[in-house]
Image (cartoon, rainbow, N blue to C red):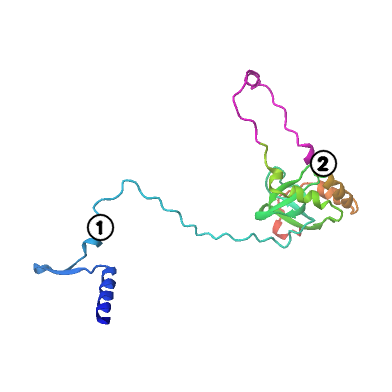
């Protein structure tokens, strides 16, 4: 009984294995190996290529924060609308983004997010004691800087004839203006305690002919 079971088991294992190729003699050409019909190339192929998902080789790694980028550090912006301006770092956000402010009354830079790759950290720091943490947390949320969705639909007669006219400039919302004033009030009071710091923040950074940035002390 056991021998019969073993034979059946071996037969099943042999059937599951790939079929072996056959060797045949062809005249003087010698012996050739002919693959099994199941191993031969297909005669027909699908008209459309089957889509295969792309293999992503890059691994998503957590962003590393530079040790020089600490809250309160004065940064120099290297790109964007306010490039060359000096700003104060308030908080680190996700994906290597920084929350900074001018303050607005000093150099015209409002609360905004900047990429940490496009800033130079200086050795000068501003004291952040007394700043409203709840306002900073509110500004640091993802939806705070989201654009308002415009109304889309069919244009009326008035909208059609008003296309050539100058549109009014969009003004910042009252909530954003209040948040800016709340944060800047404490910052400006701390900045005024140090001599020439408000003038330093108000000036723009630039390089002249003969300047060597790699030899500068930031």
Q: Secondary structure at mark 2?
A: helix
Question: In this rendering, is residue 185 above or below 166?
Answer: below
The C terminus - image quarter? bottom right
**Does residue 138 appear anywhere in the picture?**
yes
Q: Secondary structure at mark 1?
A: loop
Q: Which mark is residue 178?
A: 2
Rendering coords of residue 63 (x, y %): 64, 59
Image point (74%, 57%), residue name? 121
- The residue segment tinted magenta is 149-176
Rendering coords of residue 120 (x, y %): 72, 55
Q: Is residue 161 left or right of residue 14?
A: right
Q: Which mark is residue 41?
A: 1
Q: Quadrant of residue 26?
A: bottom left
Question: In this rendering, is residue 3 above or below 72?
Answer: below
Q: Quadrant of residue 21?
A: bottom left
Q: Is residue 12 left or right of residue 155?
A: left
Q: CA distance from mark 1 to mark 2?
A: 73 Å
Rendering coords of residue 168 (x, y %): 72, 27
The N terminus - image quarter? bottom left
- Among the two numbered marks 1 and 2 on one chain, the one whose residue lies closer to the N terminus: 1
Confirm whether the magenta stretch covers residue 122. Answer: no
Confirm whether the magenta stretch covers residue 172. Answer: yes
Image point (8%, 67%), residue name? 27
Graded by Cα atoms within 10 Å as few (under 14), some (14 to 19) or many (20 or more), the crowding at tag 1 reads: few
Image point (23%, 53%), residue name? 43
**Does residue 116 appear anywhere in the picture?**
no
């Amino acid at each position: 009984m056991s021998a019969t079971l073993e034979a059946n088991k071996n037969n099943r294992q042999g059937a599951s294995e790939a079929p072996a190729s056959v060797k045949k003699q062809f005249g003087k050409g010698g012996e050739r190996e002919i693959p099994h019909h199941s191993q031969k190339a297909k005669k027909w192929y699908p008209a459309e290529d089957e889509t295969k998902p792309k293999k992503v080789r890059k691994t998503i790694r957590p962003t590393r924060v530079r040790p020089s980028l600490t809250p309160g550090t004065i940064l120099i912006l290297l790109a964007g609308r306010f490039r060359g301006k000096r700003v104060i770092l308030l908080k680190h956000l996700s994906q290597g983004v920084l929350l900074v402010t001018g303050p607005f009354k000093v150099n015209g830079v409002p609360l905004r997010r900047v990429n940490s790759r496009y800033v130079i950290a200086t050795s000068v720091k501003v004291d952040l004691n007394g700043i409203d943490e709840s306002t900073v947390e509110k500004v640091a949320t993802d939806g705070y800087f989201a654009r308002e969705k415009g109304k889309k639909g069919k244009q009326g007669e008035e909208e059609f004839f008003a296309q050539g006219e100058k549109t009014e400039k969009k003004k910042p919302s009252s909530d954003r203006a209040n948040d800016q004033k709340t944060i800047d009030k404490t910052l400006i009071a701390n900045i005024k305690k140090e001599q020439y710091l408000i003038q330093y923040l108000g000036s723009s950074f630039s390089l002249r002919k003969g300047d060597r940035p790699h030899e500068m002390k930031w």
